[in-house]
Amino acid sequence: MNIAFSWRHRRRRGLAALLSAAALVAGSVLSTAVPAQAADESITVDFSVAGGSPTYRASGWIYGMTENGANPPDNYFTDVKFRYMRAGGAQLDSPGGWVSGKYDRRWNATRAQLLRTRSLGGQFVLLVHDLWGADGYPISRFPGDNGNWSDYDAFLTRLIDDVRATGAPVQWDLWNEPNITLFWNRPQSQYFEMWKRAYQRIRAAFPSHLIVGPSFAGVPSTGGWWTQYLDYVKANNLVPDIVSWHSLPGDPVANVATANTTLDSRGIAHPRPYQINEYGASNEQNPADGAWYIARLERAGADGLRANWAGGSNLHNDLANLLTHNSSGQYQPKGEWWVYRFYGSQTGQIASVTPSSNYDAFATKTSGTAKILIGGGRTTGNIAVTLQRLDTTTDIVQNNQVRVLVERIPYNNGGAVTGPVTVQNTVATLSGNATTVNLPHTTVDDTFTITLLPPGGSTPSPSPSPSPSPSSTPSPSPDSSPTPPVGGACSATIETTNSWPGGFQSTVTVRAGSAPVDGWTVKWTWPSGQTISSLWNGTQSVSGSSVTVRNAAYNGSIAAGSSTTFGFTANGSAATPTATCTSP
């Protein structure tokens, strides 16, 4: 067991202080907390309060793709509205990376995973420390040892050149968990100097790329290392574009409140969402806790990347332990993957939820359906979910009735799960435009979903399980609910996936019609002076407010009825103009 692996398996919910590296190497074992049996609790969903459209901000992971970027197959990402991948070749060779003369393997894996992420419409967070070699394995030197920065400068030159050659934008996470000696075993002052040098080099090389930090091991606090870092970056004009930390464990809602207090009191602007780029301790990776983190990240308005507790080659596979394999080596989803799949199916408008002390939920409504994802893995007991103002939904209530479909997503001790299990499928008569659904939460790691439908019509079928997918060479897998082929050569739709004051990010889906296409061109016109700041998986040309994007060399061919995506970040207010697509 290498050091990085043992470290990432020792943090857990309720841990008041970080464990020492010595205790980890000695192999100390923590007992699993026994969940408390609490009194019955209740949460309330108010459909009259709309909170914007879902952006799937919790659908990110640290590692989870194979070294060559080919697996897992596409459907395991697209079905959950994949947003982020965070990687840098960790644990490929031990020791590995620049400091050990083994940079190339780690970079090649990083490049492959970066390009795959972009092809799936996600953003890639680049882990610079892993490419250096500081992934928890003892290394011979750190940047700036003995006041010598020449080696680190050469490393940055190589990395900057390599990133530029990909043509794809990345988010630069300059160093992981620098407040613990496992990853930064040097004085804080040396880290600050490293931060300054890297920040200035990257800002000069890529003005439009985003810098992320400090990726703190722990959650924001009102003193200590966290505030020392904030004071330094504020005083030296080195504030990251995205402020980040790790909730292992933590409550994103409380953590964001503390972050706001500490940044606001120093006059540090934070227009973009915070990034909790590792969330979920090892004993919190189950359907109940996973759904709770999703609900809390949505409530907090923070972006999240789920932690990965695997080690060695297993780190680079299985979507951060959301997948497993059958006896033939084929991919199969675990229970928590089904949580993200339900989350990815929630569209329309976000509804207001009042949580209880141990449970929270994420709720949405759209025409003909409303969906609620319940989260909470700290206790068992009955959960009363009161659904209010159903009169403000569309095409769901008929004759004062709704159909209520309740499904349970099992943990199955971390094994494969074929899909949610139907618990209730009944028609409820409303009282005062409301009804209450009672959920028997008897298994602490399982969770529930509620789907509201019109009372008449066909009863929805149970959620199908994805077909087992090969672990070696993947073939494109269709979405579980494929869009029917469109007429004509191709079509294009623009979707806003993130926004902040003065800017936004969008994904454009290009879909072939009833025949395959070989090359495509997408055009649109901006309504209010928007301008593209970066674009990936395509080549652009601009004339005034008119934008033309043509396929890249690797994504021009699309099978009949299939699709590809490209993405961009832009300046100005978010907009989704009508796009046209043509194929030669």
Image (cartoon, grey):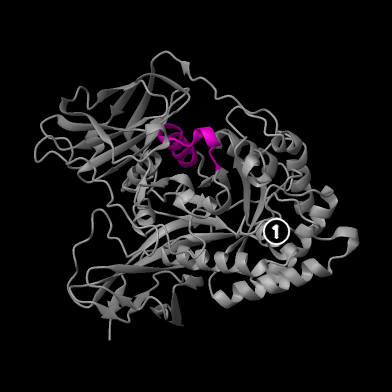
Give the quarter of the image for residue 401.
top left
Query: Badge 1: how crowded within 10 Å, few (<14), some, or many (20+)?
Result: many
4 in the magenta segment: no
Give the residue at mark 1. 133
The magenta stretch spans which residues?
A: 279-299
Question: Going 27% across and 24% down the picture, which residue do you hit?
Answer: 437
Query: Which amino acid, by three-letter code, is at mark 1?
Result: Gly
Give the quarter of the image for residue 361.
top left
Q: Is residue 118 left or right of residue 50?
A: right
Question: Going 68% across and 66% down the picture, which residue do you hit?
Answer: 102
Q: Is residue 39 above or below residue 75?
A: above
The answer to whether one can see residue 109 in this image is yes
The one of 483 and 288 positioned closer to us in this rendering? 288
Residue at the front extreme of this rendering: 327
Q: Is residue 156 above or below residue 66?
A: below
Question: Going 46% across and 70% down the picture, which residue do you hit?
Answer: 530
- Residue 227: image x %, image y %? 75, 42
- Residue 472: image x %, image y %? 40, 61
- Residue 290: image x %, image y %? 45, 37
The answer to whether one can see residue 543 in this image is no
Q: Is residue 330 above or below residue 577?
A: above
Q: Quadrant of the N terminus?
A: top right
Prevailing SS of the magenta stretch: helix
Residue at the bottom extreme of this rendering: 584
Q: Tag 1's secondary structure? A: loop
Q: Quadrant of the C terminus?
A: bottom left
Give the quarter of the image for residue 111.
bottom right
